[in-house]
Image (cartoon, helix red, strand yellow):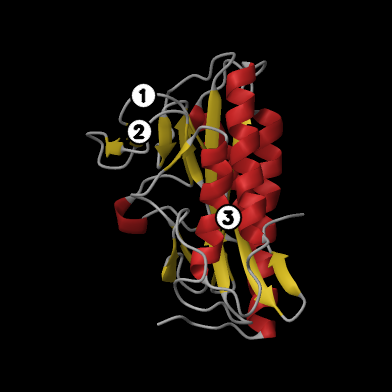
Amino acid sequence: MIILKSPDEIEKMAKANRIVATVLLKLKEMVSPGITTDDLDKVANETIKKMGGIPTFVGYRGYPKSLCTSVNEEVVHGIPGKKVLNEGDIIGIDCGATYEGFVGDSAVTVGVGKVSAEAQKLMDVTRVSLDLGIEQVVAGNRIGDIGHAVQQYAEAHGYSVVRDFVGHGIGRQMHEEPQVPNYGEKGTGPRIKVGMVLAIEPMINMGVAEVEVLKDDWTVVTKDRKWSAHFEHSIACTEKGPWILSKI
């Protein structure tokens, strides 16, 4: 069942997402050669709590950390640890925070120091594909319009779109209906309504779309080990159009 949120509930979700956005801004400034993914996680955990939030990811289905940190060929759900970031890497940072009973969720991919033109293009295309998906969050459109916009743009630049993991509705729970695929046909899927809040999160690969999960049961990597980028925003559908709750 798709749960529509009242204006008051959307305001609360904006507060949760403001925490997430603050964390991600801080971490983007921290990312540099020599730091570990655990360094990022520690700051995220402290910042979320300092702002009155709860790190949503901790304990979710047994997940141990406040962030997901996915480096290079890792697509999503990389677990922070002792991994040291190197010049030229890219890292996807996914953060969730709960505030007053509502969840905020957003992700960015960041270059470590100076990255190759190839890596920069992957990140740029993925970010723009998210923007194009967000433009479809208009009452009367359908969920398939979002995926279609993302897929068309990403594939036109020679990339592939991950099928095994998708975006989602969000609210009191991190994962609510509907699923929001990053691929699809226009005019298909549930109709978008005012009060829907969606987490749109394209995962775009340089190589094949297929992925696999490592032995830690969390980290998703590309099957051909070519690099992947991931961006995410939480967006409310309002009378005035899409409201990006996780953008400050």
106 relative to 175 in the view: left or right = right
SS for callout 1: loop
Residue 231 visible here: no
SS for callout 3: helix
Question: x and y percent of residue 150 in the render?
Answer: 55, 51
| Kind of residue at disc 3 | Ala
Question: x and y percent of residue 92 in the render?
Answer: 53, 36
* Residues marked 1 and 2 touching at CB (< 8 Å): yes
Quadrant location of residue 83? top left
Which residue matches tag 2?
221
For the residues labelled 2 and 3, the Cα–Cα distance comes to 24 Å
Question: Toward the viewer: 180 or 218?
Answer: 180
For the residues labelled 3 and 1, the Cα–Cα distance comes to 26 Å
Quadrant location of residue 25? top right
Q: Quadrant of the N terminus?
A: bottom left
Q: Residue furthest left?
A: 215
| Kind of residue at disc 1 | Arg
Question: Toward the viewer: 160 or 212?
Answer: 160
Q: Earlier in the sequence, mark 2 or mark 3?
A: 3
Residue 125 visible here: yes
Residue drawn 30% across the image and 30% down it: 223
Crowding near the residue tagged with mark 1, few <14, some 14–19, many ≥20 C-alpha atoms within 10 Å: some
| Kind of residue at disc 2 | Val
SS for callout 2: strand
Tag count:
3
Question: x and y percent of residue 197 in the render?
Answer: 58, 72
Image disc number at residue 225: 1
Q: Earlier in the sequence, mark 3 or mark 1?
A: 3
For the residues labelled 1 and 2, the Cα–Cα distance comes to 7 Å
